[in-house]
Amino acid sequence: METEPTTADRTVLQTADAHEANPLGIDEEAAAELVVTLNDSLATLQILARQIQKHHWNVEGPEFLSIHEFLGDSYENIEEATDDLAERITALGGVPVAGPEAAIERSLVAFEGETVYDIRSSIEADLAAYETLATTLREDALLAQQLGDLGTADLLQDILSEIEDDAHHIDHFLEDDTLQR
């Protein structure tokens, strides 16, 4: 039976709080500032992904299928955005937030926990998280532009567009049914 290697057996290449030079030509101080900000957004994406995935698994009721499928697609969108943002943080010379404890600590939205709630209040919570994330991504994109990092600004705008689209769809799920008399 093999045992897991200890930290003493492994070579550290970069600690989580360290920043290295980047190959993108982005000013080192600007890149370091962006990494801190982007890691908060990355943590928020990670927490939102877990929440959306949990709601996807636990949705019930007459609109089960449409909400289940939508939340599945939303989860995939968030996971793709998470990967893209983490890779950009690495390109900027930083270390992306990866652990669950760090994600919970740095996230701009609270972790909902394991309790299962009714689907209306669940997607209301999702919408609030999407709104927080959208606001933060706008601020991050503006900061990246101000610091001369147009590549990061462009990536954030792409992620923002997906987040806004999903938020718009969630808002529609929460509307009153206008077809009833």
Image: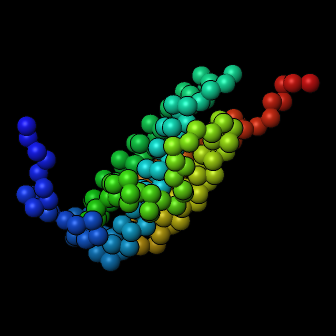
State the residue at coordinates (54%, 56%). 110
| Coloring applied to the structure | rainbow
Residue 135 occupies quadrant: bottom right
Point out residue 38 in the picture as x, y percentages from the top left corner: 41, 62
21 or 122: nearer the viewer: 122
Q: In the displayed image of the protein, which residue is found farthest to the front?
A: 1
Q: Is residue 61 left or right of residue 23?
A: right
Quarter of the picture holding the C terminus: top right
Q: Is residue 30 left or right of residue 134?
A: left
- Position of residue 32 relative to residue 103, above or below, is below
Query: Visible in this render: residue 152?
Result: no
Q: How many marks?
A: 0
Point out residue 51 in the picture as x, y percentages from the top left corner: 52, 44
State the residue at coordinates (36%, 66%). 35
Quarter of the picture holding the N terminus: top left
132 or 138: nearer the viewer: 132
State the residue at coordinates (55%, 36%). 55
Q: In the displayed image of the protein, which residue is found farthest to the bottom?
A: 29
115 or 124: nearer the viewer: 115
Query: Visible in this render: residue 60?
Result: yes
State the residue at coordinates (65%, 35%). 119
Q: Is residue 107 left or right of residue 92?
A: right
Point out residue 41 in the picture as x, y percentages from the top left corner: 46, 59
